[in-house]
Amino acid sequence: MSKENMGRKVKSDFLIAQPSLFSGAARLFDFHGLYDEYNISQTEAQADAMATFSDWVLVGQDIREAVEQHERL
């Protein structure tokens, strides 16, 4: 992970599409589930690797925040 990303929260839900308000409203009329959209990767292995990496980055951020809170006590 690069230094410029160290202070930012990393999201672990990148495989799930983030719909807009309009697309959310359009889903009300999508009775056949044709409008479902997901973020894709070239391979399953790549998607798994990216998800695992993001999860571990979040674990590291949580540990860092816990240590910082403990040091403030």
Image (cartoon, helix red, strand yellow):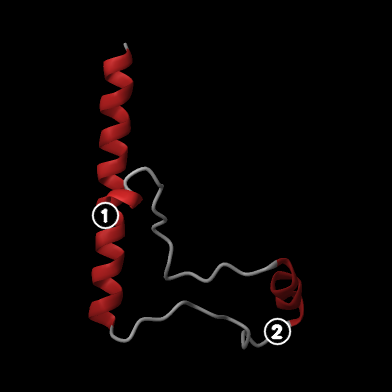
Residue 55 versus residue 59 in the image, above or below: below
Residue 53 versus residue 61 in the image, above or below: below
Say which residue appears at 76% left-offset and 71% top-offset: 25
68 and 15: which is toward the camera: 68
Residue 63 versus residue 10 in the image, above or below: above
Image quarter for residue 21? bottom right
> Quick one: label 1, few (<14), some, or many (20+) residues within 10 Å?
few
Q: CA distance from mark 2 to mark 1?
A: 44 Å
Q: Amino acid at mark 2?
A: Phe
Q: Name, please, the residue furthest toward the front.
A: 4
Q: Which residue matches tag 1? A: 2
> Quick one: label 2, few (<14), some, or many (20+) residues within 10 Å?
few
Image quarter for residue 43? bottom left
Q: Quadrant of the C terminus?
A: top left
Give coordinates of residue 23: x percent, y percent: 70, 74
Q: Quadrant of the N terminus?
A: bottom left
Say which residue appears at 33% left-offset and 22% top-offset: 69
Q: Return the mark for residue 70.
A: none
Q: Is residue 62 left or right of residue 38?
A: left
Judged from the image, the secondary structure of the residue bearing numbered disc 1 is: loop
Give coordinates of residue 35: x percent, y percent: 63, 84
Judged from the image, the secondary structure of the residue bearing numbered disc 2 is: loop
Q: Is residue 38 left or right of residue 1?
A: right
Q: Which residue matches tag 2? A: 31
Say which residue appears at 32% left-offset and 32% top-offset: 65
Q: Amino acid at mark 1?
A: Ser
Q: Is residue 35 left or right of residue 61?
A: right
23 and 65: which is toward the camera: 65
Give coordinates of residue 59: x percent, y percent: 27, 45
